[in-house]
Image: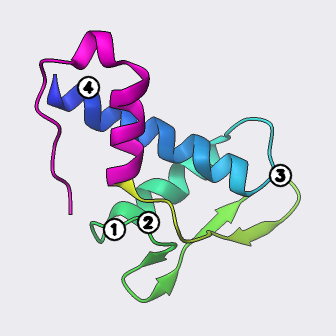
Amino acid sequence: MQYALLVGGLANAVNELSVKLAQAKPNFGMIKAIVEDLSDCKIDGKNYNQTVVVVMADSNISAPSGIGLREQIRRFYNNNYLVYNNTHIIDYR
Protein backbone atom coordinates (compact mmCIF):
# COMPACT_ATOMS: atom_id res chain seq x y z
CA MET A 1 0.00 0.00 0.00
CA GLN A 2 2.90 2.38 0.64
CA TYR A 3 4.07 1.73 -2.91
CA ALA A 4 0.66 2.85 -4.16
CA LEU A 5 0.98 6.06 -2.12
CA LEU A 6 4.38 6.75 -3.68
CA VAL A 7 3.15 6.11 -7.23
CA GLY A 8 0.06 8.24 -6.57
CA GLY A 9 2.27 11.02 -5.21
CA LEU A 10 4.43 10.87 -8.34
CA ALA A 11 1.31 11.07 -10.51
CA ASN A 12 0.23 14.14 -8.55
CA ALA A 13 3.70 15.65 -9.03
CA VAL A 14 3.41 15.23 -12.81
CA ASN A 15 -0.04 16.81 -12.67
CA GLU A 16 1.27 19.71 -10.56
CA LEU A 17 4.04 20.27 -13.13
CA SER A 18 1.48 20.47 -15.94
CA VAL A 19 -0.54 23.01 -13.93
CA LYS A 20 2.57 25.12 -13.24
CA LEU A 21 3.34 25.08 -16.98
CA ALA A 22 -0.27 26.09 -17.79
CA GLN A 23 -0.97 22.91 -19.74
CA ALA A 24 -4.34 21.16 -19.80
CA LYS A 25 -2.83 17.72 -19.30
CA PRO A 26 0.60 16.16 -18.72
CA ASN A 27 2.67 14.86 -21.61
CA PHE A 28 5.60 12.45 -21.86
CA GLY A 29 8.11 15.30 -21.63
CA MET A 30 6.71 16.23 -18.21
CA ILE A 31 6.89 12.64 -16.98
CA LYS A 32 10.48 12.41 -18.20
CA ALA A 33 11.32 15.70 -16.47
CA ILE A 34 9.91 14.49 -13.13
CA VAL A 35 11.91 11.25 -13.40
CA GLU A 36 15.09 13.18 -14.24
CA ASP A 37 14.41 15.67 -11.45
CA LEU A 38 13.86 12.88 -8.89
CA SER A 39 17.15 11.17 -9.80
CA ASP A 40 18.89 13.25 -7.09
CA CYS A 41 16.11 12.29 -4.60
CA LYS A 42 14.47 15.75 -4.72
CA ILE A 43 11.88 17.34 -6.95
CA ASP A 44 13.31 20.84 -7.10
CA GLY A 45 13.72 21.61 -10.80
CA LYS A 46 17.33 20.44 -10.78
CA ASN A 47 19.18 17.18 -11.35
CA TYR A 48 21.97 17.78 -8.86
CA ASN A 49 23.18 21.19 -10.09
CA GLN A 50 21.83 21.00 -13.64
CA THR A 51 18.48 22.57 -14.51
CA VAL A 52 15.91 20.03 -15.65
CA VAL A 53 14.39 20.87 -19.03
CA VAL A 54 10.80 19.96 -19.89
CA VAL A 55 10.52 19.13 -23.59
CA MET A 56 7.26 20.51 -24.97
CA ALA A 57 5.84 20.21 -28.47
CA ASP A 58 6.91 23.71 -29.49
CA SER A 59 9.61 24.64 -26.96
CA ASN A 60 11.82 23.58 -24.09
CA ILE A 61 11.09 25.03 -20.65
CA SER A 62 13.08 24.90 -17.42
CA ALA A 63 11.28 22.81 -14.81
CA PRO A 64 9.88 24.92 -11.99
CA SER A 65 10.79 24.34 -8.36
CA GLY A 66 8.33 23.96 -5.54
CA ILE A 67 6.79 20.59 -6.34
CA GLY A 68 7.39 18.65 -3.14
CA LEU A 69 7.02 14.88 -3.31
CA ARG A 70 6.08 14.68 0.37
CA GLU A 71 3.24 17.15 -0.19
CA GLN A 72 2.06 15.29 -3.28
CA ILE A 73 2.02 11.96 -1.42
CA ARG A 74 0.00 13.62 1.37
CA ARG A 75 -2.38 15.08 -1.22
CA PHE A 76 -2.89 11.65 -2.79
CA TYR A 77 -3.44 10.12 0.65
CA ASN A 78 -6.00 12.78 1.59
CA ASN A 79 -7.85 12.44 -1.71
CA ASN A 80 -8.05 8.67 -1.25
CA TYR A 81 -8.43 8.50 2.53
CA LEU A 82 -11.07 5.75 2.58
CA VAL A 83 -8.70 3.41 0.75
CA TYR A 84 -5.46 4.28 2.58
CA ASN A 85 -6.65 5.28 6.09
CA ASN A 86 -4.88 2.28 7.68
CA THR A 87 -1.63 2.79 5.73
CA HIS A 88 1.37 4.48 7.28
CA ILE A 89 2.42 7.45 5.14
CA ILE A 90 5.99 7.31 3.85
CA ASP A 91 8.17 9.98 5.45
CA TYR A 92 10.04 10.96 2.31
CA ARG A 93 12.71 13.60 2.91
| Front label number (1 vs 2) | 1
Q: Is residue 59 magenta?
A: no
Q: Are marks 4 and 1 in contact (CB under 8 Å)?
A: no
Where residue 52 appears, as percent x and y from the top left, is 55, 73
Q: Which residue is mark 3?
A: 57
Q: Is residue 19 left or right of residue 92?
A: right
Where residue 90 appears, as percent x and y from the top left, is 16, 43
Q: Are marks 3 and 2 in contact (CB under 8 Å)?
A: no
Name the residue: 21% across, 63% down. 93
Q: Mark 4 vs mark 3: which is more N-terminal? A: 4
Which label is found at residue 37?
2
> What residue range appears in magenta?
70-93
Q: Mark 1 vs mark 2: which is more N-terminal? A: 2
Specify the quadrant of the image occupied by residue 36. Answer: bottom left
Q: Is residue 83 magenta?
A: yes
| Front label number (4 vs 3) | 4
- How crowded is the residue under tag 4: few (<14 C-alpha within 10 Å), some, or many (20+)? few
